Amino acid sequence: MPSTIRPSALHLILSLLFILPSLAYLRAQTPYFQQEVHYNIDVRLDDEAHVLRGQIDMAYQNNAPHTLDSLWFHLWPNAYRNRQTAFAQQQNRMNKSRFFFAEDSELGGIDSLDFYVNENPVRWALHPNHPDIALLVLNEPLAAGGKIRISTPFRVQLPRTFSRLGHEGQAYQLTQWYPKPAVYDQNGWHAMPYLDMGEFYSEFGSFDVRITLPENYLVAATGTLQTESERAFLEEQIKKSSAHLDTLSDAEEPKASFPPSSPRLKTLRYTAERVHDFAWFADKRFMVQKETLSLASGNQVECWAFFTQAEQELWKEAAGYVKRSVAFYSEKVGEYPYPQATAVQTALGAGGGMEYPMITNCGLAGDAQSLDELIAHEVGHNWFYAILGSNERTHAWMDEGFNSYYDHQYSRLHYGQAGFGYLPDFMMNTSEMDIFELAYLYQARRRLNQAPETPSNELSEVNYFLGAYEIPAKALRYLEQYLGAERLGRIMQ
């Protein structure tokens, strides 16, 4: 349970802290700075209770030119805590009833928190309106240029997969799963509740993560696997998967059941540098494929695919799709800076795919072209968000719009048209009018359209897709035609 802070004092603190961004804006311009967080996490998966138990230790570097008296934290598993959270309310507005009518046993949350700073306990409290946001009040102010160590145990009850974090049986999607400081920049604090439609903004740093779970699980994760025995295990799984896929018959039915969990445990260590998040996925049924890409600099990138039998006929080519996507974006935008890129097939509850540094998870695609285009789009997010680190919640178009512009190029290169959705000629005077442009015109002529710069939590579902993805991509295509593709390409690099 959190340490107690009197309600009157807490509300005063909260009110003052939410005013701070406005005060920061009014004063003389603050030079750009970027905070830094280095994570050390030990976590264990209990696949009978669907629970994570862990310990997190963070080194938080204050690069702001002023002192901090408190820190905001995200506890995003608490978005699934009850039916009154911002996530739950958004689900209702979007007419998605699955979470609202879920059994109480299918909900989730994070607890067992006990925050220490520099080995001393600190007071903390949940936000009065958002249980997935917390405020830590420091015992001593954190001076400009100073560093503190923050630690806490934690326990996460994993929900069913209603959005991103969760499980379906013993298939696990571990995303937004650990206590995480909110971003503090020249505009102040960016403490935000978890949403399904509306993504993220996080501080850069490094991760050193140790995951303990039954030894017959296969794990795909952000970062570089440091456990040599597990690397050998994955190489064996690649051989087994290839042998299975080589003899695949069209009549073969996918196996839905999970094999029993091994009574023996293993601990896997992953490290990642210059990233702002860490995600991992675990399933005993995963098949594995891998290819290697040599970049122009000579750097090598391992390109992985983890998938079940659900769409195995399509996914047997997925490592190749990852490889050519990384090659495409490296040529068009800038060389891929990480040692690996991974695509994972999961029971995703939020859209067709979701990106994290070095890894993406994808839902069912239906056909090979759709899977290739989905992987290309999600791999592209390693540039447009993962590397640039824009505020996705406030400026969704900055990552989705630029990324859509490039994934449309990828589709034209490999399939002759910019993605799916082109209407047949008999429905339009010209096939240059695509279904997204038609949707925009429909919204605009009914005065239902919203500007792309509208924060994502204020957009309708249709306008989120149009304003964040397709309108910016179309604008960049117009700019390409005005400047010329070669000139715009040089500018973007």
Image (cartoon, grey):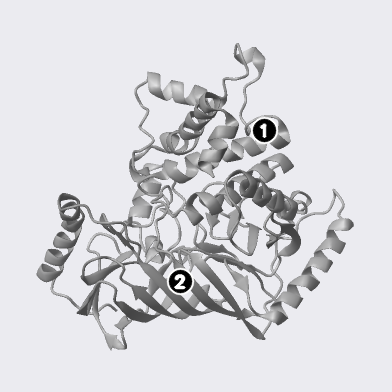
The residue lying at 39 percent from left, 22 percent from top is 444
Residue 257 x %, y %: 70, 65
The residue lying at 41 percent from left, 24 percent from top is 443
Q: How many marks?
A: 2
- Asked whether, in this view, residue 253 is left or right of residue 1, the answer is right
Q: Is residue 26 above or below residue 71?
A: above
Residue 155 x %, y %: 43, 77
Badge 1 marks a residue whose secondary structure is helix
Q: Is residue 279 visible?
A: yes
In which quadrant is the N terminus drawn? bottom left
Three-letter code, disc 1: Arg
- The residue labelled by disc 2 is 157
Q: Is residue 70 above or below residue 356?
A: below
Front tag of 2 and 1: 1
Q: Is residue 462 above or below residue 142?
A: above
Residue 446 x %, y %: 37, 20
- Asked whether, in this view, residue 297 is left or right of residue 273, the answer is right
Residue 363 or residue 104, whichever sits in front: 363
Residue 487: which quarter of the image?
Answer: top right
- The residue labelled by disc 1 is 412
Three-letter code, disc 2: Gln
Q: Is residue 179 visible?
A: no
The residue lying at 59 percent from left, 31 percent from top is 485
- Asked whether, in this view, residue 176 is left or right of residue 375, the answer is left
Q: Residue 42 has which mark?
A: none
> Is disc 1 surrounded by few (<14), some (14 to 19) or many (20+) residues within 10 Å?
few
The residue lying at 23 percent from left, 75 percent from top is 143
Residue 66 x %, y %: 21, 67
